[in-house]
Image: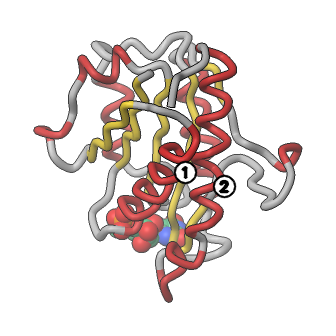
Amino acid sequence: MKITILYFSKTGNTEKAASYIKEGLMETGDFEIKLMNLNEDSTIDKAFINESETVIMGTPTYAANICWQFKKWFDTDWDCQLGGKLGAAFATANAMHGGGDIALQAMISHMLVRGMLVYSSGAGCGRPFIHLGPIGIGIDNGVEQRKNMFNIFGKRVGEQSIRLFGNVKK
Ligand SMILES: Cc1cc2nc3c(=O)[nH]c(=O)nc-3n(C[C@H](O)[C@H](O)[C@H](O)COP(=O)(O)O)c2cc1C
């Protein structure tokens, strides 16, 4: 099963979170995982996205919203067929109350508009409570401090992917 982790990262925080999520996925199943940074056109493998059962998307919080690079991608890239895929969102921000949750909501809205099945790995899934998706606070090594949360998010999304799309041999 293929899983894409699509993110935008300029200063490395969201990229780090993406790598922690990948670690969690790898502990869960024999997935083929690709990380793609919207920063670099060359990393966007549309064929792989289209073949992915699950697409996890991560954004830095810009003005309490998704970054413009993601908004542009959603508004312009209709070649990527997201309908029916499992979607899950994560974010980074500089401040605890800097709007990370609003960025996640915006991301989730775009996923829903594209027909994705959205999974938050939310508070109903136990501790750590994740709510809309994990948020890492970029300053003071906040993303590293939340490594475990991103790992667990990856595991939970991996488990749901297997549940929805079939078992995967290890
Ligand atoms: C244009 C811009 C707007 C930002 N707006 C916010 C914001 O509203 N709230 C916040 O907490 N952090 C804000 N930040 C900080 C970033 O969300 C944070 O540093 C993020 O972790 C950067 O991700 P990256 O290292 O993956 O590029 C902003 C950064 C930039 C460049």
Residue 101, numbered label = 2
Q: Position of residue 134 (x, y in %)?
A: 63, 56
Q: Is residue 74 left or right of residue 170?
A: left
Which residue corresponds to the image point at 46% horizontal and 32% vertical from the top-left? Answer: 30
Q: What residue type is disc 1 on?
A: Gly
Q: Quadrant of the N terminus?
A: top left
The picture quadrant for ligand 1 comes to bottom left
Q: Characterize the local packing of mark 1: few (<14), some (14-19) or many (20 or more) Cα atoms within 10 angstroms.
A: many
Q: Nearer the viewer, mark 1 or mark 2?
A: 1
Q: Is residue 166 above or below residue 66?
A: above
Distance from the alpha carbon under mark 1 to that under mark 2: 22 Å
Which residue corresponds to the image point at 54% horizontal and 51% vertical from the top-left? Answer: 24
| Residue reaching furthest to the left | 42
Q: Is residue 91 left or right of residue 127?
A: left
Which residue corresponds to the image point at 27% horizontal and 47% vertical from the top-left? Answer: 37
Residue identifier under label 1 = 24
Quadrant in which residue 152 is drawn: bottom right
Q: Position of residue 146 (x, y in %)?
A: 60, 71
Q: What residue type is disc 2 on?
A: Asp
Which type of secondary structure does the marked residue at label 1 adopt?
helix
Quadrant in which residue 167 is drawn: top right
